[in-house]
Image (tube, grey):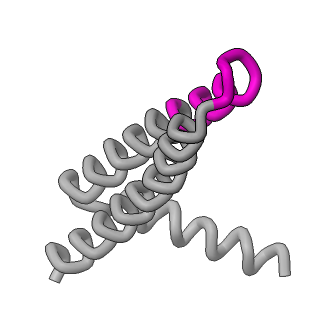
Amino acid sequence: MQFNLSKNLEKIVTSFGKMAKLPKALMKYGCIVFLVLLTAGSIMALLNTTVLNYDSYMDLVSKSLVKISFSIAAEAVIGGLVLDFVFKK
């Protein structure tokens, strides 16, 4: 079981290493945008509940930022993989 897992992970790592520049860049910058939005939303939510007076609008904005960040990450990763698959053919 452990051998199959390590073998599968090795295949994934080598496949990502063979990707073209554009899909790699899309995934890289998509993950950076994901981390920035996730951090901003988390800090806003934390400040809203602890330091600042509670504001329902800020709560909505912070939760929306966190949700959108995950959507952007998924779109960047899936889009990068699809672009790589299309350009390799």
Rendered view: 74 above or below 26: below
Residue 82: x percent and y percent?
A: 28, 75
Taking the magenta stretch, the answer to whether it contains residue 38 is: no
Rendered-image quadrant of the C terminus:
bottom left
Rendered view: 77 above or below 56: below
Please tell me which residue lies in front, 34 or 62: 62
By secondary structure, the bulk of the magenta-drawn segment is best described as: helix
Q: Residue at x 53, y 71 (%)?
A: 11
Q: Residue at x 71, y 69 (%)?
A: 6
Q: Residue at x 60, y 32 (%)?
A: 55
Please tell me which residue lies in front, 19 or 76: 76
Residue 35: x percent and y percent?
A: 49, 38
Region of the chain picked out in magenta, as a range: 40-54
Residue 26: x percent and y percent?
A: 27, 52
Rendered view: 39 above or below 88: above
In the displayed structure image, the side of residue 67 where residue 54 appears, left or right: right
Count of marks, rendered view: 0
Taking the magenta stretch, the answer to whether it contains residue 45 is: yes
In the displayed structure image, the side of residue 86 where residue 64 appears, left or right: right
Rendered view: 80 above or below 64: below
Residue 50: x percent and y percent?
A: 76, 22
Q: Residue at x 15, y 74 (%)?
A: 87
Kindly give the residue lying farthest to the right in the view shown: 1
Residue 78: quadrant of the picture = bottom left
